[in-house]
Amino acid sequence: MLRLKLPTDPRWVNLAEKDLEEILTDHAYCEQKAATSCISLIQQYPEKTEMVKKVAPIVTEEWGHFRMVLLEMEKRGLKLGRQRKDKYVNELLKFEKKGGSREDRLLEKLLICALIEARSCERFRLLSLHLEEEDLRTFYHKFMVSEAGHYTLFMDLAKLYFDEKKVLSRWQEYLAHEASILQGLEIRGDRMH
């Protein structure tokens, strides 16, 4: 379903499990950034009525996810650390076509959102399958399902506002670039991406 070109290295789950405070901290900030991205889409494209209607609930959902991660950390006696740069997302943003029309920029933003959600879904799936602790597997399964829905929504919005061939062509370019990004990043258990 996700069509990612390069699967996550299976060692990532083992590294993530070794320092739950770090991976949960990064996860919390990823949820916060996802809410912010949706708010930005609404602010930049308020005339896209269908998008506003579909994305507004995601803002609430992502913020709820942030709070869920905070509660999970509190339950475990862990503290939220400082936010760090997300090299993965920064590299994706460098690939975004600059200039062009507002419409062109919307397509880029929707595809970047879709790709981040797809990779998050894939990572949450790995955690839901391979973490030793059953409660954490269940915790991450819920996130996996949610991210899959978000990925689909952003792709559907791109196809709503743009020619499907154009969307799928640019999507393939993003998928290839994303695979090259992953190949260049070290495997770190303290990052969701």
Image: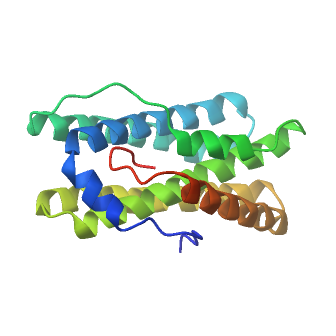
Q: Residue at x 28, y 35 (%)?
A: 67
Residue 134 point in image, percent of width and height: 12, 63
Residue 155 is situated, as x and y percent measured from the top left of the image, at: 64, 60
Residue located farthest toward the right when viewing the structure as drawn: 100
**What colouring does the structure picture have?**
rainbow
| As drawn, 4 above or below 185 | below
Q: Is residue 68 left or right of residue 93?
A: left
Q: Quadrant of residue 61?
A: top left
At horizontal 42% and vertical 66% (from top left) the residue drawn is 9
**Count of residue discs:** 0
Left of 83 or right of it: where is 134?
Answer: left
* Residue 52 image point, x, y percent: 62, 40
Identify whether 10 is placed above or below 108: below
Seen from the viewer's position, the closer of residues 104 and 49 is 104
- What is the quadrant of residue 115 in the picture? bottom right
Looking at the picture, how far across and down is residue 190, in whole percent?
33, 44
Query: Residue 145 versus residue 8: which sits nearer the camera?
Result: 8
Res. 89 image quadrant = top right
Confirm whether residue 89 shows in the render.
Answer: yes
Residue pictured at 64% horizontal, 46% vertical: 92
**Residue appearing at x 39%, y 34% in the figure:** 29
Q: Is residue 50 visible?
A: no
The vertical placement of 192 against 10, above or below, is above
